[in-house]
Image (tube, rainbow, N blue to C red):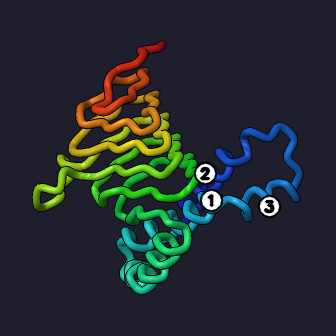
Amino acid sequence: MFKVIKLIVSDWKRYTMLHKKMNLFLLIVVLLRNPGMYFSIVYRVERYLLLHKFFPFKLLGFLLYPGYFIFTYYILDIDISPKVSIGKSLYVHNRGIIFTEKVIAGNNLTLIGPIILGTKGLGIVDSADAPNLGNNVTIFTGARIIGGVRIGNNVFVGANAVVVKNVSSNSIVGGIPAKLIRKYK
């Protein structure tokens, strides 16, 4: 459970890092006014419960899943299953975010929705058919990442880009289909 709390705190720090001087009141305001922070909390707790080896926790996660789905899908408009693996320091800005169940994402993921990360829809979904994101990836509004694509570390995916091929680390991609715009160090 301490690991979940550490993940939630690291997510919260992503929301507060833009403000240099934060008092307790502002920290609470940041927590209460960001739908992405609500999502982060319920996602981390539900993932912990569903994937726990201790049966009562797993059962509790199973029983709470309908509430998780209703809250995240209908209220927050974010469709990310708790089976999706997302590293620490998640930042969700805006709504309309859809992930396929087998997506794997690294640390410091920034999602500026609406965006879609999914499979090609050719039958049974396995990990090889779902996107795999590295660390420090930022995905901008309208982007689509389709199929078993590997996105490297320190990558920016531009607005409305459609990524269907692997993207190397330290790069900016954009367009339909996405092409390398710039490589940086």
- Between the residue at mark 3 and the residue at mark 1, the CA separation in whole angstroms equals 11 Å
Question: Who comes first in sequence, dot 3 or dot 1?
Answer: 3
Do the numbered discs 3 and 2 sit on residues whose CB atoms are within 8 Å? Answer: no
Residue appearing at x 30%, y 58% in the figure: 100
Residue 11, numbered label? 2
Q: Secondary structure at mark 2?
A: helix
Q: Which residue is identified by label 1?
A: 37
Do the numbered discs 3 and 1 sit on residues whose CB atoms are within 8 Å? Answer: no
Residue appearing at x 46%, y 14% in the figure: 184
Tell me which amino acid carries mark 2.
Asp
Give percent across and percent down for residue 130.
24, 49
Tell me which amino acid carries mark 1.
Met
Give percent across and percent down for residue 35.
62, 62
Q: Residues within 10 Å of mark 3 (few under 14, many from 20)?
A: few
Residue appearing at x 57%, y 54% in the figure: 94
- Between the residue at mark 3 and the residue at mark 2, the CA separation in whole angstroms equals 14 Å
Tell me which amino acid carries mark 3.
Ile
Q: Quick one: 174 or 155, which is closer to the camera?
A: 174
Give percent across and percent down for residue 163.
30, 36
Instruction: Indicate the quadrant where residue 179 lies.
Output: top left
Q: In this rendering, is residue 131 above or below 152?
A: below
Question: Who comes first in sequence, dot 2 or dot 1?
Answer: 2
Give percent across and percent down for residue 146.
26, 45
Do the numbered discs 2 and 1 sit on residues whose CB atoms are within 8 Å? Answer: yes
Residue 118, numbered label? none
Left or right placement of residue 177 versus residue 39 in this view: left
Q: Which residue is identified by label 3?
A: 28
Q: In this rendering, is residue 104 above or below 20?
A: below
Q: Residues within 10 Å of mark 1 (few under 14, many from 20)?
A: many
Left or right placement of residue 158 versus residue 7 in this view: left
Q: Secondary structure at mark 3?
A: helix
